[in-house]
Image (spheres, grey):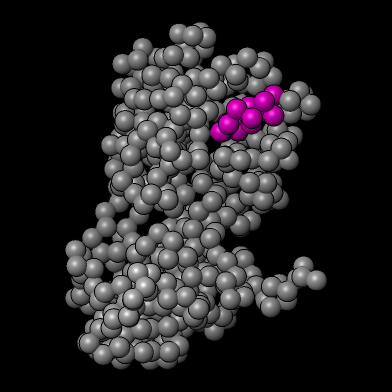
């Protein structure tokens, strides 16, 4: 027999994870307020978000549908702005960005992090003040750097020696003196998925602290009078639920701040500790309170600076998921329902890995509920799957749904406001869903649904 192929058994990926079988909820109709949007509830059995009934939303805007609770999103912006008063809060646009979201961020007084010319264009198109924008990226093109310098973005985070040289040239060309931060990889192990841990040395981002590359980056920037070095930047990963890793990162960054002061006589006034703050996706997940995060990080930075004999730098943070994640819910319509006797029931919906690839990519977990009605039926072990030609096309790997679930029912998946629309794709030529914002019982489309004409546009 081939060592690469073998007869298939009766199970795919086993029935349940042995180390953590899914908990059967006491009530399949409840909406945990720590997971669902702040305005979510049920009225006459149907889930409502922002005062809008999900049945009406799908009837008006179609399915699948991304729904964003505007008040939830804005209120979390305010929570961060107030908690980090005296510092800076920049929303990480990669979590989810469109023109309307950029307006919300601007109106709520936050800055914005962008990682590409496209994200920058979205911000500039609504009049977002460029001085409140930070440009990130490990491989910014010359055109992207030129645009950032030309429009005067507030900070550019340098990520390579080539980039420093390009910035010097572009600053001369445009007669500007951009403010530069150095992205430092501090060697902190964030306890998260390997694809979203970003501060260990063996990865694509930033300058290694341990190798001396970060110190050399500072030398090169300070040698170019057309560039202004204002601080250090670190991002240790995503979906982080405590401040321990940030404390280690801050202590290691302080050694570089001291080295720069001793070697160049320069005291850098800013320290950006990035984002990555986690949110609860399923029952039992714990996420830190924003005030606790702010108080903890301020205390860490103050102690580290004082121990190093440095003035306390201005602290910047970059929440993305923590603002957008819980504001978003995805609505699906149930299609086929297949019972695999003795194993589980496969519930297929009209979307899948094209609108939420995180389950396939990261093994992400979600909470889902029957949304168009309540049910008192016995729970059935289910796998919520999409309609794509991939066995790994799962929205929720293991969950309990009511045993009377039927074709045409609506399923709501919570916590999809971050990285779902941003990572959406057209696999199997499925159009990307619309995004509808809800507030005070009203809904409006802020990103329209793609059409087949959109999919064919640009093809010969």
Q: Which quarter of the figure has residue 186?
A: top left
> Would residue 297 appear left or right of 143 to someone viewing this image?
left
Whether 341 is drawn above or below 119: the answer is: below
Q: Is residue 81 left or right of residue 174?
A: left
- Indicate the quadrant where residue 404 lies: bottom left
The residue drawn where x is 60% and y is 20% is: 221
- Rendering coords of residue 319 (x, y %): 45, 45
Residue 74: percent from left, percent from top: 48, 54
User: Which quarter of the figure is the N terminus placed in?
Assistant: bottom left
Q: Residue at x 36, y 83 (%)?
A: 346
As drawn, 257 above or below 281? above
Q: Which residues are magenta?
A: 156-168
- The answer to whether one can see residue 85 in this image is no
Q: Position of residue 317 (x, y in %)?
A: 45, 38
- Depth check: 39 or 428 in front? 428
Magenta-drawn stretch, dominant element (helix, strand or loop): helix
Is residue 388 in the magenta section? no
Q: Residue at x 23, y 60 (%)?
A: 284
State the residue at coordinates (58%, 76%). 428
Residue 157 belongs to the span the image colors magenta: yes
Residue 342 visible, this orientation: yes
In this rendering, would 194 be left or right of 151? left
Tag count: 0
406 relative to 19 in the view: left or right = right
């Amino acid at each position: 027999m081939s060592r690469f192929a073998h007869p298939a058994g009766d199970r795919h990926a086993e029935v349940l994870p042995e180390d953590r079988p899914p908990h059967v909820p006491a009530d399949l109709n409840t909406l945990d307020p720590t997971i669902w949007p702040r305005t979510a509830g049920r009225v006459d059995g149907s889930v409502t978000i922002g005062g809008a009934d999900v049945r009406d939303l799908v009837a008006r805007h179609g399915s699948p549908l991304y729904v964003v609770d505007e008040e939830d999103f804005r209120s979390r912006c305010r929570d961060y702005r107030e908690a980090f008063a005296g510092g800076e809060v920049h929303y990480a646009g990669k979590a989810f960005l469109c023109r309307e979201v950029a307006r919300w961020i601007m109106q709520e007084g936050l800055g914005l992090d962008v990682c590409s010319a496209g994200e920058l264009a979205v911000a500039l198109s609504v009049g977002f003040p460029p001085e409140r924008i930070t440009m990130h990226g490990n491989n910014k093109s010359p055109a992207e750097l030129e645009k950032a310098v030309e429009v005067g973005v507030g900070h550019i985070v340098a990520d390579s020696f080539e980039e420093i040289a390009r910035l010097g040239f572009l600053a001369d060309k445009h007669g500007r003196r951009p403010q530069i931060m150095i992205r430092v990889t501090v060697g902190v192990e964030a306890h998260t998925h390997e694809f979203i841990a970003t501060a260990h040395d063996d990865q694509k981002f930033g300058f290694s602290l341990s190798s001396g590359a970060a110190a050399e980056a500072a030398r090169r920037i300070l040698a170019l009078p057309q560039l202004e070095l204002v601080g250090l930047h670190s991002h240790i990963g995503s979906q982080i639920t405590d401040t321990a890793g940030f404390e280690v990162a801050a202590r290691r960054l302080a050694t570089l701040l001291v080295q720069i002061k001793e070697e160049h006589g320069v005291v850098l006034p800013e320290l950006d500790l990035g984002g990555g703050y986690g949110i609860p996706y399923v029952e039992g997940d714990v996420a830190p309170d924003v005030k606790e995060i702010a108080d903890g990080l301020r205390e860490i930075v103050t102690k580290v600076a004082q121990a190093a004999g440095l003035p306390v730098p201005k602290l910047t943070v970059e929440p993305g998921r923590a603002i957008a994640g819980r504001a978003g819910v995805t609505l699906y319509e149930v299609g086929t329902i297949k019972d695999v006797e003795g194993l589980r029931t496969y519930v297929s919906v009209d979307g899948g890995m094209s609108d939420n690839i995180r389950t396939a990519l990261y093994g992400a977990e979600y909470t889902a509920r029957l949304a168009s009605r309540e049910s008192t039926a016995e729970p059935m072990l289910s796998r919520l799957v999409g309609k794509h030609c991939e066995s790994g096309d799962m929205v929720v790997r293991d969950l309990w749904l009511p045993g009377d679930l039927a074709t045409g029912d609506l399923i709501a998946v919570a916590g999809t406001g971050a990285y779902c629309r941003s990572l959406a794709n057209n696999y199997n030529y499925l159009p990307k869903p619309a995004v509808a914002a809800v507030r005070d019982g009203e809904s409006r489309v802020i990103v329209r649904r793609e059409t087949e004409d959109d999919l064919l546009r640009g093809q010969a």
